[in-house]
Image: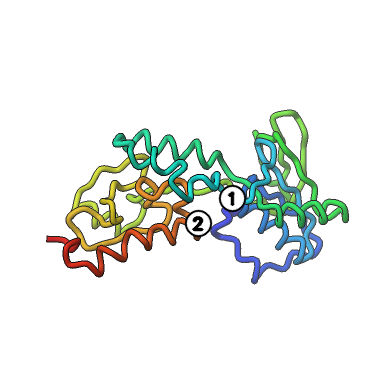
Amino acid sequence: LSHSHDVDLRSCSLAGERVLIVGGGLTSGHLAVGAVARGAQVILMARRDFQEKLFDADPGWLGPKYLKKFSAETDWQKRWQMIQQARNGGSLTPAIMMQLRRACRKGKISLHEQCQIVEAIWQDDYWQVRCHDGAEYQCTRIWLGTGTKLEVRANPMLREVLDSFPTAIVNGLPVLDAHLRWPRCELFVMGGLAALQVGPVARNLSGARMASDRIVPALTKPSLALV
């Protein structure tokens, strides 16, 4: 039983194994395709229907269409709620979905939607898994691709920064200034932890570009330097 963060497909020899992967996001999809390539029989299970989307949030979040209203919102909690609504859980890109369907046709993967696991028991050399609808499955490994909660206080370094330079924390995310700078500190934050400023796409490449556009002026313009 492993979380996706602890799975290294490069070192896995899975020939003859049956792997249950729990989660409906891109991480689960990549793990499923990788496990099949290494000889495993895969059960891919999600508690809702699999969603096929090219982007993890509507493309409108890449420009002013949605960001204008988001940036105008001064309540950080409401911003966080807007982020959750826009992301709406995990999804699979068309490219990965095509690979999964191809593997399904070959009998190497089975997809199971609307399945909520209620019990998993290790019996000798396999897992016996039962879902809320009574369906049962057997597997030799369980990988959890159920996402990771962003929590700034879980990072030892950022926890020290928070102790020295307190700032508001909203559902695990720090409140940064407009240039993604930690208040009163020359530390700039990118990625998911900058979502309260960047928006729902903060975690992906588009979000990284948007974050860079905010950070660079603060590093290069004396007028924006911390005083």
Q: Residue at 72% across / 68% down in the picture? A: 13
Q: Is residue 109 above or below residue 170?
A: below
Where the C terminus falls, by quadrant?
bottom left
Residue under label 2, please give it: 204
Residue type marked 1: Phe
Marks 1 and 2, Cα distance to the nearest angstrom? 9 Å
The quadrant holding residue 89 is top right
Q: Which mark is residue 55?
A: 1
Q: Residue at 52% across / 42% down in the picture? A: 87
Residue type marked 2: Asn
- Helix or strand or loop: what does disc 1 sit on? loop
Residue 125 appears anywhere in the view: no
Judge by depth and name the residue closer to the eye, 2 or 123. Answer: 2
Number of residues whose C-alpha sits closer than 10 Å to that of mark 1, classed few (under 14), some (14–19) or many (20 or more)? some
Q: Is residue 205 above or below residue 48?
A: below
Q: Is residue 83 left or right of residue 173?
A: right
